Image: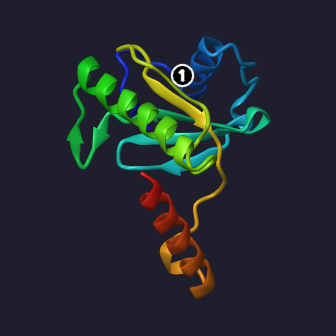
Amino acid sequence: MKFQTTENFTELELINTALRNEGLNEFYSEKEINRLGEGAWHFAYLIDREQLVLRIPKKVAYDKEVVFNREELMVEYDGTKSFYKNANKAKKGICPEHFEYFIDEELTYTIESYVGSTIGLGEQSKEQSKRYGRQLGEFFSFT
C-alpha cells in the first residue's frame, strides 16, 4: 500500500498517528486493523470500537501519482464537511454526523461516523431500490 506521505510509515503507524491526533486509543497490533477497502483516492479503515471510518489518501490514483496540495485538500474536505452538515439539517442521519480531517504532508486523513456497509446497486432488491429512490427524492425536494 502506498500512502500519500513524505515519511516511510507503516500502515499501523499511520493509523495510530491519526488515532492519537483524534484523542482515541491506538491499536496494539496489525490484527486490529479492519480494512473496509479502497476507493480511487483513499484507503478506508473501520475503527470498530468508536464506529468511525478513517480514510488515508493514496499516493497513486487512476495510475497517476497524486501530488500533495494543501489548498485542494482543504477545499475538498471542507466541502464534504459542509455538505454533510447541511444534508443532515435537511434529513437527520442521511450523512455521517461526525466528520473531521487533518492535513499535513506527513499524514493526511479524514475521520467520520460509520453509517454501515455499502450495498451495491446490482445487489439491491427491487423493493430496496424503490425505497432508496423515494428517500433520495424526499431529500432532494427539501434541499
Q: In the rendering, at what x and y percent does residue 100 appear?
A: 53, 25
* Secondary-structure class at tag 1: helix
Residue drawn where x is 37% and y is 21% of the image: 5
Give the farthest residue toward the front: 142
Q: Is residue 143 left or right of residue 14?
A: left
Front-lying residue, 80 or 111: 80
| Residue type of the residue flagged with mark 1 | Leu
Residue drawn where x is 22% and y is 27% of the image: 67
Q: Which corner quadrant of the image does residue 6 belong to?
A: top left
Residue drawn where x is 62% and y is 84% of the image: 127
Q: Which corner quadrant of the image does residue 50 belong to?
A: top right
Q: In the rendering, at what x and y percent does residue 25 appear?
A: 75, 19
Q: Which corner quadrant of the image does residue 8 belong to?
A: top left
Please say if 68 is above or below 52: above
Circle 1 Cα neighbour tier, 10 Å, few/some/many (<14 / 14–19 / ≥20): many
Residue identified by numbered label 1: 14
Front-lying residue, 39 or 122: 122
Q: Quadrant of the N terminus?
A: top left
Q: How many marks?
A: 1
Give the farthest residue toward the bottom: 126
Q: In the rendering, at what x and y percent does residue 132 appear?
A: 55, 71
Q: Is residue 94 left or right of residue 25?
A: left
Q: In the rendering, at what x and y percent does residue 33 appear?
A: 67, 37
How is the rendered protein coloured? rainbow
Please say if 84 is above or below 138: above
Front-lying residue, 124 or 141: 141
Residue drawn where x is 72% and y is 20% of the image: 26
Q: Is residue 44 left or right of residue 113?
A: left
